[in-house]
Amino acid sequence: MDPILTKYVREPNSFTLDFYVEHEGYAALKAALTKKPDEIIEMVKASGLRGRGGAGFPTGMKWQFVDKKVEPRYIACNADESEPGTFKDHLLMERNPHLLIEGCAIGCYAIGAKVAYIYIRGEFLHVQGILERAIADAYARGFLGKNILGSGFDCDVYMHRGAGAYEAGEETALLESLEGKRAQPRNKPPFPALVGLYNKPTAVNNVETLCNVPLIVSKGAEWFAGLGPEKNGGPKLYCVSGHVKRPGVYETDMKITLRELIDGHAGGVRDGRTLKAVIPGGSSVPVLMPDQLDTQASFDAIQKAGSLLGSAAIIVLDDTTCMVWLAENLLHFYRHESCGKCTPCREGTDWLHKILRRIERGEGQMQDLDLLSSVSANIAGKTLCAFGDAAVTPVTTTLKHFRHEYEAHIKEGRCTLTADWRARHTVGAHA
Amino acid sequence: MSFHPKMAYDATFHKSARTLDETDKGAGPPFAYTAENRARFDQIVKRYPPDRRRSAVLPALYLAQYQQGYITANAIRHVAELLGITRADVEDVVSFYTMFYTKPVGTFVVQVCRTLSCALNGAERVTEELTAKLGITPGQTDASGTFTLVEVECLGACDRAPVVMVNDGWHECLKPEDASRLVDDLRARGESVLSGCHHVVELKKKAG
Ligand SMILES: Cc1cc2nc3c(=O)[nH]c(=O)nc-3n(C[C@H](O)[C@H](O)[C@H](O)COP(=O)(O)O)c2cc1C
Ligand code: SF4
Ligand code: FES
């Protein structure tokens, strides 16, 4: 499939309003404003668009759940993009900001909101600048603001900058953060569609999700659904990183297989190396083994294979990768990012990291492996948000497939796979 | 403080254990926004409903940090007063988010991404090189106050690994062997030596 969302990202001026309008930009908004809001929701439902933020929940359904009896309503666009291995929203916002703005405006019209907040991670200041300029240009041309294109519909889009917190990507934590508090999640239910920002009905949508909305409006739900396998329609951005020759964002439909993405688009693993395992959906999902590479990279097929498509962050690991080291690296992340609201996650991630670190250094004991499983079991399913399950996955999945590597560390008293890209001394997070 | 008597937290950043300096020294010099920042602040609060000024706490703290370099108790008081919330409310936020500094930092805050995709491509070695070059370990500022070295988690540019951020600027594909030169270049020419982000690099190449 030829790229659609990222078709023009390599054009120098792709981020400008003039370029966007010359390439049929804002035509979808114009078309949407001639329809009834419910018709838009029906279209999005019929397209089968599923959320691109991680959970793959149908967007049309989410919009339908938004309580239309309560005013005001909001769209909160999730531009926190912090799942390790994910960098697709980054590219979309940097090179195609008007597509997101158009998606926000159509989304607002559909659910009857007048304001959309784009919550962007604090580190993306350069991207925020591009979006802010794009928003200002859109106001100046009448695509945002009062009485958009003479339709009587008002819509404001504002940027909101986060300040370094992975957990702010969780939808209710994002709303807390938008309200000026710590990014700690709320209990669900009630879901944001009923009680969201400022306790008002809110649709929280990922950047890539909203970017698909203008396509659905202009090209039709059927076209969109027809692009991929059943229930996995539309274009999809894949982020391939790790040990590949050509890491990057690749856009195709979801019929593609992991092998085509990794060996085809990303050029395969580096010369002289072999593939060891693949993390197909961001750091929070189970690994897939080389014999599973012919799995289709769709939400449903990857789930059937025992993992999750998540944020479509494909992290490729070659034979130089020590899987104990990998688990330690990721648990350092989770330990650092746990929001601290619930005990199993706050304490457990710290314990897991400590145990992994001592095993990785060759100071572990065999009973540590049971301890890892037991601590993991006391986190998974026992926490307020999905972070807990995510955090134990690197441990449980490596224990499942690579237990022998853990045992080797303990028996040998050291790591036997010290690749040249690894630290030579204990420094920083490693110390 | 850890909640388990035998499992103290590590010294590195942990959200639950982070506290602010509440001594008189930590309060810092008297603080109020400059006229320019006050005007910016007044613009920003308009984005939120009038009874939800608290929403502006992150942007308000950024303004304070850009003005003074780091967040002090006096800055917290100023922000709290302007937003009509308590100092504890603001402190709660400052102690949670990693991008607010509660102590003075160097002219260049070098933030090395250490998460998986960067680590697989040599980020640990970048940190090693920087540590050796600067004579400080992550979390420290050098004696001259020029460099602060920090390790951060995934920056969302993993195809350009290893990635470092210097203040708000980006530098991508930093090979370990080039890390030391980046320090020299920053010293000599400042942030202009950074590669910038993503396609900016490619577009520059394309344009020649
Ligand atoms: C710990 C955690 C972190 C998350 N981080 C992000 C993120 O960075 N970006 C994102 O779009 N969704 C993230 N999500 C998913 C959101 O909670 C939510 O499902 C999503 O924004 C909904 O939008 P969508 O339906 O368009 O995917 C995260 C979820 C969890 C549990
Ligand atoms: S699971 Fe972890 S991140 Fe989620 S609310 Fe609990 S402590 Fe916070
Ligand atoms: S792992 Fe370094 S930017 Fe994602």
Image (cartoon, helix red, strand yellow):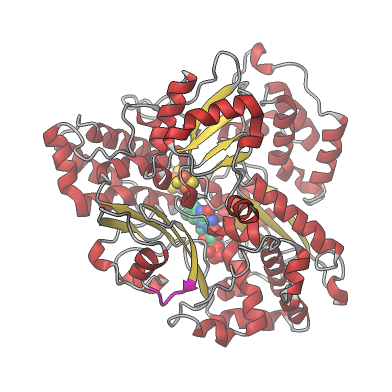
Left or right of residue A431: residue A56: right
Q: Is residue A40 above or below residue A113?
A: below
| Dominant SS in magenta | loop
Depth order, front residue of A281/A387 = A281
Depth order, front residue of B59/A87 = A87
Depth order, front residue of A164/B174 = B174
Seen at 33% across and 63% down, the residue is A307
Seen at 59% across and 14% down, the residue is B144
The x and y percentages for residue A374 are 24, 44
Seen at 53% across and 34% down, the residue is B111
The x and y percentages for residue A187 are 52, 53
Magenta extent: A252-256
The x and y percentages for residue B24 are 67, 12
Q: Is residue A188 visible?
A: no
Left or right of residue B132: residue A272: left
Seen at 74% across and 84% down, the residue is A35
Residue B192 in magenta stretch: no
Left or right of residue A29: residue A183: left
Residue A255 in magenta stretch: yes
Q: Is residue B104 visible?
A: yes
Left or right of residue A315: residue A160: right
Q: Quick one: quadrant of the C terminus of chain A?
A: top left
Q: Is residue A331 above or below residue A241?
A: above
Say how many tags the image has: 0
The x and y percentages for residue B66 are 72, 31
